[in-house]
Image (spheres, rainbow, N blue to C red):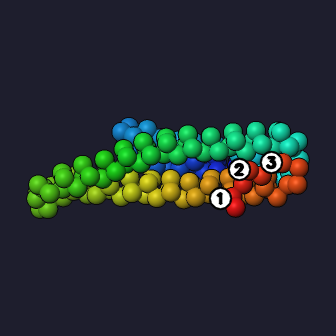
Amino acid sequence: MPYRVVLASLVFCAVAGPALAQSCGSAPIAPALPTAAEMAQKTPVAAAAAKHDAFAEVKNWQGELKTYRDCLNGIVNQDKRQLEGLDPKKDADKIAGLQAEGKAANHAYDQTVDMEERVVNEFHAIQASFCARKDVDKSSCPK
């Protein structure tokens, strides 16, 4: 499962569009998390460390996502401001380009939301696997 998220993020980076790559860079690559099955095979101490590390990696990645999304929102807002002063008859090509760039930025943003949902669901599976064990400290588990 984590390999699919990494693969999806690499495909997304290739498809996001050259304009976005120039201005915002590429989307942050999702962390590779252990699977629930891998968590079940770890010792209690190793499982606790893996859960903690996964949490930290997801939080750091979400911070990078926020920065990337802020940049994408900036592109959309800038394009909207530029569109306000253009004449549809004289500037049809420029309008089409700005609209395409805004659409690509919105699509890239939506892709990161989908990716974040998958990663968070993977983390919850890790957490559930950890909390289902009988040999671990469950103080960090949801009540």
Circle number at residue 137: 3
In this view, 106 is above or below 63: below
- Residue 25 placement: quadrant: top left
Residue type at mark 2 is Ser
Chain-order first, disc 3 or disc 1:
1
Residue at 88 percent across and 49 percent down: it is 135
Question: Residue 125, how many percent across, how many down?
Answer: 73, 57
Chain-order first, disc 2 or disc 1:
1
Q: Name the element at disc 2.
A: helix
Q: Is residue 93 visible?
A: no
Question: Residue 118, how many percent across, how many down?
Answer: 62, 57
Marks 2 and 3 sit apart, C-alpha to C-alpha, by 7 Å
Q: Name the element at disc 3.
A: loop
From the image, tell me which residue sits under label 2.
140
Q: Name the element at disc 1.
A: helix
* 34 relative to 85 in the view: left or right: right
Residue type at mark 3 is Asp
Q: CB under 8 Å between callouts 2 and 3?
A: yes
Q: Residues within 10 Å of mark 3 (few under 14, many from 20)?
A: few
From the image, tell me which residue sits under label 1.
121
* 70 relative to 46 in the view: left or right: left
State which mark lies toward you, 3 or 1: 3
Residue type at mark 1 is Asn
Residue at 50 percent across and 57 percent down: it is 113
* 125 relative to 13 in the view: left or right: right
Question: Residue 53, how many percent across, how many down?
Answer: 69, 39
Question: Residue 79, how many percent across, how many down?
Answer: 25, 52
Q: CB under 8 Å between callouts 3 and 1?
A: no
Marks 3 and 1 sit apart, C-alpha to C-alpha, by 22 Å
Residue at 38 percent across and 37 percent down: it is 22
Residue at 23 percent across and 55 percent down: it is 80
State which mark lies toward you, 2 or 1: 2
